[in-house]
Amino acid sequence: MPEICVTIGRTRHKMVLAEHRALAERGATLVELRLDWISRQADLSRLLQNRPTPVVVTCRRPDDGGRWRGSEDDRRTLLRQAIVSGAEYVDLEEDIAGAIPRFGKTKRIVSHHDFVQTPDDLEAIHARMCKLDPDVVKLVTTANSPQDNVRLLHLVKNAVVPTVAFCMGDLGVVSRILCGKFGAPFTYATFSQDRVLAPGQLSFEEMKRIYHFEKIGPQTPVYGVLGDPIGHSLSPLLHNLAFHHERIDACYVPMRVPADEFADTLRAYEFLGVQGYSVTIPHKQAALRFANLADESSVEIGAANTLFKDPQGKWRASNTDYAAALESILIGLAQKGVKSLSGQRVLLLGAGGAARAIGLAVMKSQGVLTVTNRTKARGKTLADELGCQFVTWENRGASACDVLVNCTPVGMSPNVDDTPYAQHWMHDGLVVFDTVYNPENTLLLKEAREHGCSVVSGLEMFVRQAAAQFKRFTGREAPLDVMRETLRRRISPVRYQLPDDPEEAS
Ligand code: NAP
């Protein structure tokens, strides 16, 4: 079973001890003590006495990403003392591992870091390190391409000596989460999101309670969300929660992929055992081109937000935004007893990707659509494509409608005091659907509610498109209510705590 090694980097002994205790209480089984962070002379007996978990003792020089300010002799003395004191592991950089011999039961991690790149001679470096009497080889590089993850994971899989290898940087998150699947004895995480010590590092809570790192095995199917940027995506939270709740062995990973590397990355990621992807900006058109087969909704919209493998191993494209948006509007209409969009006058604010998918859904449901957009030419083009009316942005308040749909980011956090539609333009009986989901309760929805309108939040659409992806990935219904409540709590202004068990979220 792979473990999560949690790094503690604090300047005072007291804080190191407090974090170590707190981590043990939260279920940590291995902790790295970074002696180079301690501002005074490190007192090993104080740090190791009655330690609540096994430890890795590490003391990094600035060149290796550390903060050690003392002499090299003093640093090596400290590492030797850690070995004599019986620390479970000591981390020895490649250049000093030969000079510090094995002693007692302390295991040797021989490490190498590259803060610039993932070098071409990776295998040669690894072979060199294997000759330095390691119990574990630790090889950490910087990802300049998503494919660097695959090179590191290949190394882990083929290694004879247990090897922890992954990439730093936000392109490298994939290998941090998946190294255990390929045989790494542990990965590294940080004490909390506020204490990231290396680029791309995840917190212990995220590794344990979102990604369930310790449960990812060689056979665990992988799913992911492709985008650029991807750091703030809430899809990993929702999908991993759904897998865990339904007791499905699967892991869902955020995958940053630059636009020009899309197809090459997907081909390289076959090695990871990926069975399905959520797809977001800027890859939705490329996903459609990549697929072997595409469903009607994605072909009509010209964009796919989902790729999944069918039993024959073919990639299928789908667009779950389309149906999720339609369902959300119907929820709003149902609040006033209307069962279908047919004949309903819909005013669509915006002319981007979301507006295009929703506009098409409205037209196909026989709604009477009008598009408005800040940039006239773009709005007019979409209206012409959809075969509907267009009004200028300045005149949007004068356009009579039964349903208002906001497909612009106006009102999205942090600009929560903005709204794309004035309250005095609203009327009783209007249905207002805001695709913005962060915050859930946008100013547009607050004002609409005050006015007695029926409202639907973008949260509903977001959860529903994810649930539809889950169904395509697994063939099973997603736990919609649990997903909705978790997302609601995650984006609420009160700081969200990850549940110990996702069933708590129900
Ligand atoms: P997009 O392709 O970039 O289009 C953005 C649209 O918003 C464009 O029409 C743009 O007008 C308009 N816009 C941007 N800033 C504006 C401003 N300050 N004032 C007026 N109009 C403005 O983005 P998209 O993919 O369509 O996404 C749009 C929004 O939909 C997102 O921000 C997100 O909140 C929401 N969304 C929600 C879900 C969900 O599941 N709930 C899914 C997808 C999208 P110009 O043409 O003038 O630039």
Image: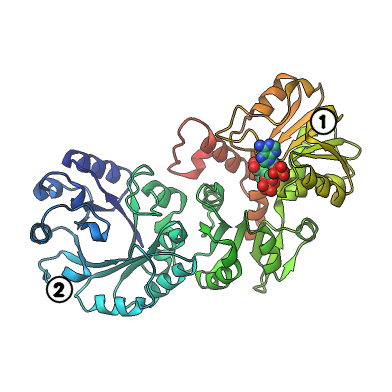
Residue 173 bears which disc, if any?
A: none
* Camera-side residue of 189 and 476: 189
**Ligand 1 picture quarter:** top right
Provide the secondary structure element on which disc 2 rests: loop
| Residue drawn where x is 36% and y is 66% of the image | 141
The three-letter code of the residue at mark 1 reads: Asn
The disc, 1 or 2, on the residue closer to the chain's N-terminal end is 2
| Residue drawn where x is 77% and y is 47% of the image | 378
* Camera-side residue of 403 and 83: 403
Q: CA–CA distance between discs 1 and 2?
A: 76 Å
Work out whether residue 460 can be spotted: no
Looking at the image, residue 441 lies above or below residue 59: above
Q: Is residue 156 left or right of residue 448?
A: left
Q: Position of residue 346 (x, y in %)?
A: 83, 36
Q: Quadrant of the C terminus?
A: top right
Residue 98 bears which disc, if any?
A: 2
In this figure, which residue is indicated by the disc labeled 1? 395
| Residue drawn where x is 68% and y is 52% of the image | 468
Q: Position of residue 99 (x, y in %)?
A: 11, 71
